[in-house]
Image (spheres, rainbow, N blue to C red):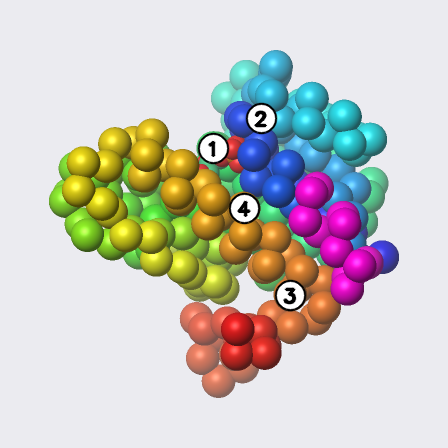
């Protein structure tokens, strides 16, 4: 079985999409085996527990605001389940090399824009403020630079006249749920690799779809 750990901070709708789409996909034997949440009382925790998945809360406050110490605890919990892939699905806290070096090329992040446009907080609001006609979704390798690693999958989402954060956000979330589920499925099928000739680029064998 391909073992997936998911890091979350809030609503957990992308975690739910993975539970709904990947667990039930009979073409791939993959399961979410652990959820780590950066906030007490986040709705994502209840989603995990309802699906029978172990959920652990690891806050920055409990580690005196020291990210490296906090990540040490995250790594300890992750190692207990030996994940093949660690998915940051709405994890809203900067991570350190303590985490990234423990799982090289195994930590991926979801972001609601076509990176490198609009990294950081409130990417949907940033896109609306800028007035772009097209934004989107990126799943990428996590690096120390916020939202900075090589893209794996990207999909554009048009910005429509009169769009608000809510209306654009709803369309972006719909794309995120599909794209992240597809990305995890492709990983579980061994169809995503770094390009040895161009280490910034990822090779995705998605059958041309
Ligand atoms: C998602 O839109 C995700 O792309 C974003 O947080 C949201 C989490 O939603 N992540 C970032 O902005 C990371 N820079 P969810 O909790 O409902 O899955």
Query: Is most of the magenta stretch helix, strand or loop?
Result: loop
| Front position in the image: 114 or 108 | 114
Ligand 1 within 8 Å of the CB at mark 1: yes
Q: Earlier in the sequence, mark 1 or mark 2?
A: 2
Which residue position holds label 2?
38
Is the residue marked 3 within 8 Å of ligand 1, measured from its CB? no
How many angstroms separate mark 1 from mark 4 (CA)? 17 Å
Residue 118 shown left or right of residue 182 in the figure:
left
Across and down, in percent, residue 142 comes to 50, 52
Image coordinates for residue 1, horizontal then vertical, percent: 85, 57
Q: Which residue is mark 3?
A: 186
Query: Crowding at label 3, few (<14), some or many (≥20) Cα neighbours within 10 Å?
Result: some
Judged from the image, the secondary structure of the residue bearing numbered disc 1 is loop
Q: Earlier in the sequence, mark 1 or mark 3?
A: 1
User: Mark 1, residues whose alpha carbon is within 10 Å: few (<14), some, or many (≥20)?
Assistant: some
Q: Which residue is mark 1?
A: 92
How packed is label 2: few (under 14 Cα within 10 Å), some, or many (20 or more)? many
Q: Nearer the viewer, mark 1 or mark 3?
A: 3
The answer to whether marks 1 and 4 mark residues whose Cβ atoms lie closer than 8 Å is no
Label 3, secondary structure: give it: helix
Q: Position of residue 202 (x, y in %)?
A: 50, 72
- The tag on residue 177 is 4
Residue 142 can be seen, yes or no: no
Are the residues flagged by discs 1 and 2 in contact, CB closer than 8 Å?
yes
Is residue 198 rendered to the left or right of residue 75?
left
- Earlier along the polypeptide chain: callout 4 or callout 3? 4
Specify which label sits upstream in the sequence, 4 or 2. Answer: 2
Q: Which residues are magenta?
A: 19-29
For the question of whether residue 51 can be seen, the reply is: yes
């Amino acid at each position: 079985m391909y073992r997936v750990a998911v890091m979350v901070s809030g609503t957990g709708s992308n975690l739910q999409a993975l539970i709904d789409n990947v667990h039930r996909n009979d073409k791939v034997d993959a399961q979410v085996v652990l959820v780590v949440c950066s906030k007490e009382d986040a709705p994502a925790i209840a989603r995990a527990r309802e699906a029978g998945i172990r959920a652990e809360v690891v806050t920055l406050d409990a580690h005196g605001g020291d990210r490296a110490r906090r990540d040490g605890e995250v790594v300890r919990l992750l190692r207990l389940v030996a994940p093949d892939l660690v998915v940051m699905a709405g994890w809203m806290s900067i991570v350190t090399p303590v985490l990234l070096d423990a799982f090289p090329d195994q930590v991926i992040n979801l972001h609601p824009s076509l990176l490198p446009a609009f990294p950081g907080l409130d990417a949907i609001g940033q896109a609306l403020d800028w007035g772009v006609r097209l934004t989107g979704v990126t799943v990428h390798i996590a690096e120390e630079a916020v939202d900075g690693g090589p893209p794996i999958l990207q999909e554009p989402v048009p910005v429509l006249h009169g769009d608000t954060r809510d209306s654009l956000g709803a369309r972006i979330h719909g794309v995120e749920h599909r794209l992240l589920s597809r990305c995890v499925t492709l990983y579980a099928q061994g169809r995503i690799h770094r390009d040895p000739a161009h280490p910034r680029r990822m090779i995705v064998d998605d059958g041309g779809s």
